[in-house]
Image: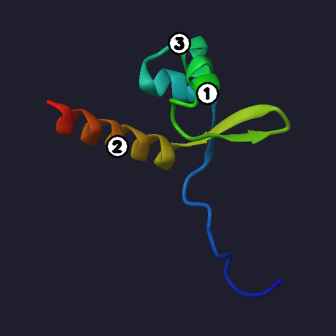
């Protein structure tokens, strides 16, 4: 393999407990969000959810924009 990857990894993968702490919610809340498809984007690796912090931050920014346009 030569050259650079098309999509380089920009942030490390985090465990759901770390993301729950970052968002100040319980792990069960994060799990419910995953099931409902309403939470931050995640990657499933061998049945385990992992998150990129930049994707979580982008999700938060999108929530801010959604709420700002409503009120």
Task: Please tell me in which quadrant of the rendered image residue 15 appears.
Answer: top right
In the depicted view, which residue is nearer to us: 68 or 55? 68
The picture places residue 39, in percent across and down from the top left corner, at 51, 30
Hey, which residue is sitting farthest front in the picture? 70
In the depicted view, which residue is nearer to us: 63 or 54? 63
Task: Please tell me in which quadrant of the rendered image residue 52 appears.
Answer: top right
Are the two marked residues, 3 and 2, in contact with CB atoms closer than 8 angstroms?
no
Q: Residue at label 1?
A: 34
Could you tell me which residue is drawn at 67 percent across and 37 percent down?
Answer: 50
Quarter of the rendering occupied by the C terminus: top left
Q: Residue at label 2?
A: 62
**Dot in front, 1 or 3:** 1
Q: Which mark sits nearer the N-terminus, 2 or 1? A: 1
Give the CA distance from mark 2 to mark 1: 17 Å
Q: Which mark sits nearer the N-terminus, 3 or 2? A: 3
Badge 1: residue crowd in 10 Å (few <14, some 14–19, many ≥20):
some
Badge 3: residue crowd in 10 Å (few <14, some 14–19, many ≥20):
some
Q: Residue at label 3?
A: 26
Give the CA distance from mark 3 to mark 2: 21 Å
Q: Which mark sits nearer the N-terminus, 1 or 3? A: 3
Report the disc number at residue 63. none
Q: Secondary structure at mark 3?
A: loop
Q: Secondary structure at mark 2?
A: helix
Could you tell me which residue is drawn at 70 percent across and 33 percent down?
Answer: 49
Query: What is the total number of numbered labels drawn onto the structure image?
Result: 3
């Amino acid at each position: 393999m030569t050259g650079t990857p098309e999509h380089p990894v920009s942030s490390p993968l985090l465990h759901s407990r770390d993301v729950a702490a970052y968002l100040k919610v319980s792990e069960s809340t994060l799990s419910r969000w995953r099931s409902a498809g309403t939470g931050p984007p995640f990657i499933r690796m061998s049945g385990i959810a992992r998150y990129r912090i930049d994707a979580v931050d982008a999700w938060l920014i999108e929530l801010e924009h959604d709420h700002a346009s409503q009120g």
